[in-house]
Image (spheres, rainbow, N blue to C red):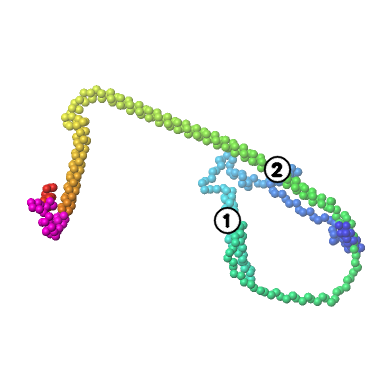
Amino acid sequence: MKNDERHFERRKRAYKKSGNCFSSRFPQTPRALPKKLAPIEGMMNMLPRLLRGEQSVPFGNIMFDRRVARGSTFAPVPALIDGEQSIAARQAEARRRHLARKRAQMQACRALVARTGSPPPVPGRKHEPVQTEIFLEELAEKPDESEVATQTDYFLEKPEPPSYYPGKTGQDACTQIEPGELFDYDTEVQPILEVLVGKTIEQALIEVLEEEEIATLKEQQRRFHELRAAEKAEEQRLAEEERRRREEKDRRLKQHEEAMKTQQETEERVAAAVLLTGYIAELLPAVLEGLKMSGYLLDEIKADVEEGFMPWLMKEVKKEMGNMIESRELLMEIIKEILENRAQTYRQLGEEYDISKEKKPISVDKDLEEDETDNNFVNYESPAMENNNVI
């Protein structure tokens, strides 16, 4: 550090001795301060300047303010027709549509960029597939590989050094710059620090005021929401109470109407019964006798027997007779089948007996004694005779 300061002082002295203007190369005047940026326009940013009296309150023609209603102060405010909008509403709708269209175009551009992928390779090169996933997997299939060789150019020969160097002219000189001769850092940096500190304090004050205003607005909004919720709950309670009262009223009216209707019907029935009691007392025996003579009034037991029991009895008798006939026919079929089987059996036995008799006539005669008969021949009956006996 000391060597640098000494070298700087020597250079300064050399410039002074040579007669050159040192201030032209190392100006001692500070640079121009950066222009102070104007804060964001708004009442909160204009508040400090208004308090100091540096700026007056902006003014303008109130008739060109969109927030001021035109026309007579006594006439009612004209209501917008269905489908008609104010100029501000139309401008807001146009801005909203423009922003939506711009947002859709940006999304389409982003989607197109995402779909395009990597740019094509430059001539002489090619892209290799590389896994970009978080979890890599082993690739068993290896692509085809080939070796290619190339040769670079030979090194160029070193150029020959120039044969002539021009001689040095002039007189060497040096100078020395002492600390504090060029500029005083503490003095020169003070305006910049004042600007930075003032700007920081102003911005901090603005932010604090904005935070206080936002907090106040949030508190007012919270109170408004609470009041609105309470009013809405009270409105719902009153509506529910009104609905219950209306339903109770309708139910009571309906019950009263039904009771009145029932009472009226009862009174009419009682009056009709009282009026018809004396009239029917004398007319009823004659009417019943006439109906009985005409055959409309029958004995209940007789009618029940003739209409219910007798048809059922006839149906059951017919069913039983049919079962008996079917059983008899089935029995006859079984007997007939048995007789046919026995006749066939006896016929076969007779044929076998005749054959055996023809083969052994002598032996049979010898075996028979006088006044004796063959038991088989005596007891034998033809199948036809047996069938006749059975029948």
Identify the disc placed on residue 268: none
Q: From the top left corner, tell me how far across and down residue 382 is, in percent.
A: 12, 52
Q: From the top left corner, tell me how far across and down residue 91 is, in percent.
A: 59, 51
Q: From the top left corner, tell me how far across and down residue 186 is, in percent.
A: 84, 51
Q: Amino acid at mark 2?
A: Leu
Classify mark 1: residues with Cα within 10 Å, few (<14), some (14-19) or many (20+): few
Q: Judge by depth and name the residue closer to the eye, 55 or 112.
A: 112
Q: Amino acid at mark 1?
A: Ala
Q: Residue furthest left?
A: 371
Q: Residue at x 10, y 53 (%)?
A: 369
Q: For the residue labelled by badge 2, is the local secondary structure a helix, a strand or a loop?
A: helix
Main SS, magenta residues: helix
| Residue identified by numbered label 2 | 209
Q: Judge by depth and name the residue closer to the eye, 390 or 21.
A: 390
Q: Is residue 380 visible?
A: no
| Residue identified by numbered label 1 | 104
Query: Along the horizontal axis of the image, is 78 left or right of 293?
Result: right
Which portion, as a residue range, is magenta? 347-376
Q: Is residue 28 magenta?
A: no
142 shown above or below 229: below
Q: From the top left corner, tell me how far across and down residue 180 is, in percent.
A: 87, 54
Q: CA distance from mark 1 to mark 2?
A: 38 Å
Query: Along the horizontal axis of the image, is 387 left or right of 81?
Result: left
